[in-house]
Image (cartoon, grey):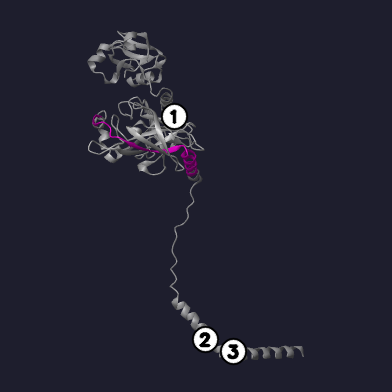
Amino acid sequence: MRLRRHAIIAVIGIAGLLGSCEQKGLTPGANAGESRRAAAEALAAAPPAAPATAVTPRTESPDVAKNLSKAFAATARAVATSVVRIDVRAGRPPVAERDRSPRGNPLSDNLPPSFRRFFFDPGQAPDFPGPGMPGPVAGTGSGIIIDGAGNVVTNSHVVDNATEIKVTLSDGQEIPARLIGRDRRTDVAVLRLERLPKNLVAARLGDSDRIEVGEWVLAIGSPLGLEQTVTAGIVSGKGHVGRFVQMSGDRVRRYIQTDAKINPGNSGGPLVNLDGDVVGLNTLIRTGAGGAYGFAVPINEVRRVAQALLTDGRVRYPFLGVSVRDLATLDEVTKQKLGRDAPADGAYVADVTPGSPAASAGVKLGDVITKLDAENIKTSADVVDYVSSRNVGAAVAVTVFRDGSTRQLRATLAPAPG
């Protein structure tokens, strides 16, 4: 009885539905046909589905590569706030300075003029155009904030003949700056911000004597007038300046070579190790048959010069008063005059300046300097290095070989003439 009641209710429901459809002029069959036509029309109007596109597979880099990449990024972030861009407006340098030959170095001629604006050859004014260009002119370089007083260290050639200096911080603040002092002979200059911004961050200066060849470093700066950029490489070499390596100042005694790309405008920016320590001041590029080579002044030397400029406004160099040559460069006649007992290592005295500390101490033409204080002298560069490391007024024991025997003289270093 209950089953029959449910069947009757179902029949009544269906009949009601059919009646409703008839009142609207529709039948179940017609409704289905309309739906199929609408669906077909929608499909025809839709754009064809794009074919499946192959996607390159995701690679899994080794952990050592990930860690190195993270170290690069962390170092760049840590140092970035202490690196600034320096924009300079300047009058044209004297023609005599622009035309002066860069110590006869043929490699300098290979630098395109656009590069010489930013990276100079020794003895030239590189950041600015040649004699035919109108002035004033503009140049761009980089710099490093070294303390909370707003002092910024950069290359001397970046601010050559500057009449207006503007420093741009990493956050975009533009602050005028003035020149505190510069030393052409080491290519180091110190600027000071005209006003102190909030949250000024100084770079941490490292110990350039401790860096190793093969160590990873980053070069940071504003190449070609761009915003701050970072390049990575290693310390390719380091050593004493000599016949084969000439730096951007004749008093730079040591160098750091790097294959981290140093572009025009990086001049005055930092060379940084992965501990975030500044180990060098990017100073120039050299071009030759093998390509381009980047060099930096060791930060220990930069620190010493910057301190002198902040204290005295200039650098006083010690002076011994001898012109020396490597023993290996002597002709056979001169070697024979030295005798069979002549030392294998040392610096041959080719000239003594009259009235100099060396002359007063009794150093003579033809002597071979074998030791300064306790420092053994192997080449002429060792004499320059040691004297440069001492202060004006320091007493130096000079050991020389003369007439088949050695003798010790004593000289007091004087300020270098000029």
Determine if residue 21 is in view.
yes
Question: What amino acid is found at the position of numbered circle 1 in the picture?
Answer: Ser
Q: Of the numbered discs in the image, which one, if any, rests on residue 99?
A: none
* Circle 1 residue: 208
Q: CA distance from mark 1 to mark 2?
A: 87 Å
Decide whether residue 15 is among the magenta residues.
Answer: no
Instruction: Provide residue 174's location: percent of width, then percent of height.
Output: 43, 40
Above/below status of 169 relative to 34: above
Above/below status of 416 relative to 166: above
| Mark 2 residue crowding within 10 angstroms, few (<14) / some (14–19) / many (20+) | few
Q: CA distance from mark 3 to mark 1?
A: 94 Å
Question: What amino acid is found at the position of numbered circle 3 in the picture?
Answer: Cys
Quarter residue 193 falls in: top left
Instruction: Provide residue 13's location: percent of width, then percent of height.
Output: 67, 88
Residue at the spot 34% in from the left edge and 34% down from the top edge: 163
- Which contiguous range is marked in magenta? 68-96
* Circle 3 residue: 21
Q: Nearer the viewer, mark 3 or mark 1?
A: 3
Residue at disc 3, secondary structure: helix
Compared across the picture, whether 204 is left or right of 337 comes to right
Quarter residue 285 falls in: top left
Q: Earlier in the sequence, mark 2 or mark 3?
A: 3
Q: Nearer the viewer, mark 2 or mark 3?
A: 3
Q: Quadrant of the N terminus?
A: bottom right
Residue at disc 2, secondary structure: helix
Instruction: Provide residue 138's location: percent of width, then percent of height.
Output: 32, 39
| Mark 3 residue crowding within 10 angstroms, few (<14) / some (14–19) / many (20+) | some
* Circle 2 residue: 33
Residue at disc 1, secondary structure: helix
CB atoms at circles 3 and 1 under 8 Å apart? no
Q: Earlier in the sequence, mark 1 or mark 2?
A: 2
